[in-house]
Structures are given as structure tokens and as C-alpha cells.
Amino acid sequence: MSKNKVLKCASGLLAAAVVSLSAGVQAEGNYVMGTATTGGTYYPVGVAISTLIKVKLEPSTNISVSAISSAGSGENLKLMDEGQIQFGILQGLYGAYAWNGSGPVSKAYKNLRSVSMLWQNVEHFVVTREVAKTGTIEDMANLYGESFSIGARNSGTEGSGRFILGKVGIDLEKINLAYQGYGPSADALQNGNINGMNIPAGVPAAAVTRAYANMGDEITTLNFTPDQVARVNSDFELWTPYTIPAGTYPKQVKDINTIAQPNILAVRDDVPEDDVYEITRTIYENLPFLNNIHPATRAMALEKAIAGLPMPLHPGAARFYKEQGVEIPERLIAQ
């Protein structure tokens, strides 16, 4: 399919979603997926998935999934709970909060199930070289009394950064926190205004690339030991080890052994098993199609489909993975 046709198809899907929602009626087999704002990655990935289903699945089954923009994970939870949408893309940590009714989410959303990990947010705790005595995340304690950018205020970046550092025993009250986005954080690091930055993102992260290009071996990205990974996962089995190969960033001469949390596709538990099975099958049998529409989907692979999922799998998704020989842990089997 040509790029123009893909874009026309995506536009048609969005229009169909708006009509469907405004009518207040959800026809059988016609589903809606909440994403996030149009400027991020959630929305175009949602459109990519809905386009794939429109082209590869709907003609033979009448199953369709239309992607709509939203305010992100929080609104997607609300809309799924109300039945206004059936699918939603969620940040992994937010999904864990939702399943458990913890953190900023006061209600447990037990009517939700996982479909798949989509792509990962890879944790980059980048610090100046003199801070990195051991090279692991415990070196964040060497920033006591110094400045560190935790992320924009009230962002998912700030939230996940606080969670991770708290789990490994770092007292953030002793660090002078700056609340900056990715680009401003890289600028502040290069200008000597901060001694480190928190950048959870897909690899390669543009802000990290820029910092390495300008500072080279003056900075490093901290590693996580197996024990530190276990401590981060003491509440939720969410983060998985992730190796950033040497050479990914300018002047990066060694592998970086960090961690990553998933962005996930979630679904209401009352969506029929056969429909979720067909959607999951269609996604994984057509990954090159998705890759051609949005590069974030290049991180998707069957062997990583259930990595770090925060809630049990929908039976339809679980059936597909079992057929493919994927071993499903007990915690991901819906009761």
C-alpha cells in the first residue's frame, strides 16, 4: 500500500471514530481505541494499528478498531471503564497503578486486560562522569546537594523517575530537582546547570544523542544490577533488563545495562475472546506493515509481547500466544 493510501485510510478511521462516538452506539465488532494527544507517539501508533486492522482484518471479519486522540492514560482508563472505548494505550506504570488501585489511581480497574506490550520506554539516568563512582543507579546518591532534572512537573517522566529512585533507596529530598522536558534537560546538562537528567524514551533518545554528541565521555548513563532491578520491581513486575549496545549514542564505547517499562495495549474484559484473538493475530502476523507506518512499532516482536505487562492477558490474546509457543506466567492468566 502506498503512503498516500495509508494516510487516507488513517484519516478515514479517525472520521469513523468521531461519528461512532457522537452517535453513542457501538456496533458489534466495531471498536474504538484511546491513544493520547496527536503530538506524541501513542496517537500515530494507534492509527497504525487501526489502519492495519482496517486493511487486513475488517474485509473478512467485519472487525474494526478506530483510533481517537485523548488526554492519555488517565482518560483512556476512564473511557474504557465507562464503555465509551474498548481499547486503550497505557503507560506500563499507569497500568499497574490502575490494576492495583494505587498511586494516583484511587480505583482498581479489574475490568481491564492486557493485549500486548507495544514498545518500551527505556530508562536513561544520564549523569556527569565524576558522579558515576560505581556506574550503577546507586551513584544517584552522589548527587545529594547537586542539581538533577527529574522531568517536567506532573509528567509520567517525573512519576516513573521518582518511583524507580525511591525503590533503590535514593532520597530525592536531598537532591536539587529541576523540572524540565527532554530538550531543555539536555541543554541544561551541556551548560553545566545540572549534573544529570532522567530520560525515559525509545532508543535512541534524541536528547541523549545530543548530550553525548556534545559532551562525549564527560557523561555516562547509569546501569542497573540484577538486585537493583528486583528492588525496582518489588511492587510491580513491570521493568525488564534492557541493553543499549555500544555505539548507539555518539562516543558511547560500552553497552549500557538499564531497564525498560512497556507501553501496553489494554482492552475491556467483555470484548469477545474471538475478536481479541483475531486482532492480536493480525498485529503479529503483519509487523512489517506496522513498521512501515510508524517506526515505534519496530520494537514489537512476539518474544517480547508479554514483557512487563501489568495486568492479566485477555483470553483471546493468551490463546494466540499459547499457539505460538509463548510461555505465559501464572500472574498473567486471567481468573
Image: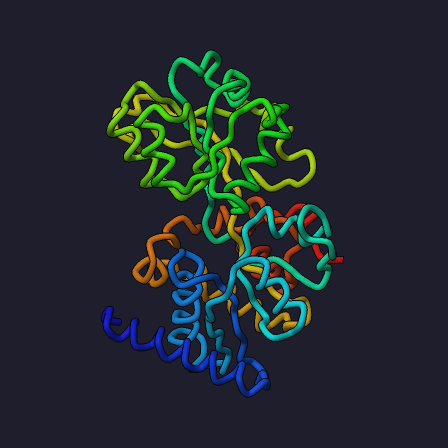
Closest to the observer, 313 or 257: 257
The answer to whether 296 appears left or right of 74 in the picture is left
The answer to whether residue 36 is above or below residue 230 is: below
Q: Residue at x 30, y 77 (%)?
A: 8
Quadrant containing the C terminus is: bottom right
* Tally of numbered tags: 0
Quadrant containing the N terminus is: bottom left
- Quarter of the image holding residue 321? bottom right
The answer to whether 7 appears left or right of 273 in the picture is left
**Residue at the outermost right position:** 335
Closest to the observer, 19 or 289: 19
Residue 157 point in image, percent of width and height: 50, 42
Residue 261 point in image, percent of width and height: 53, 42
Q: Residue at x 52, y 47 (%)?
A: 155
- Quarter of the image holding residue 230? top right
Q: How is the image coloured?
A: rainbow
Residue 229 point in image, percent of width and height: 58, 29
The answer to whether residue 197 is above or below residue 319 is: above
The answer to whether 300 appears left or right of 164 in the picture is left
Q: Residue at x 38, y 59 (%)?
A: 39
Closest to the observer, 326 or 65: 65
Q: Residue at x 46, y 70 (%)?
A: 67
Closest to the observer, 137 or 292: 137
Residue 235 point in image, percent of width and height: 69, 38
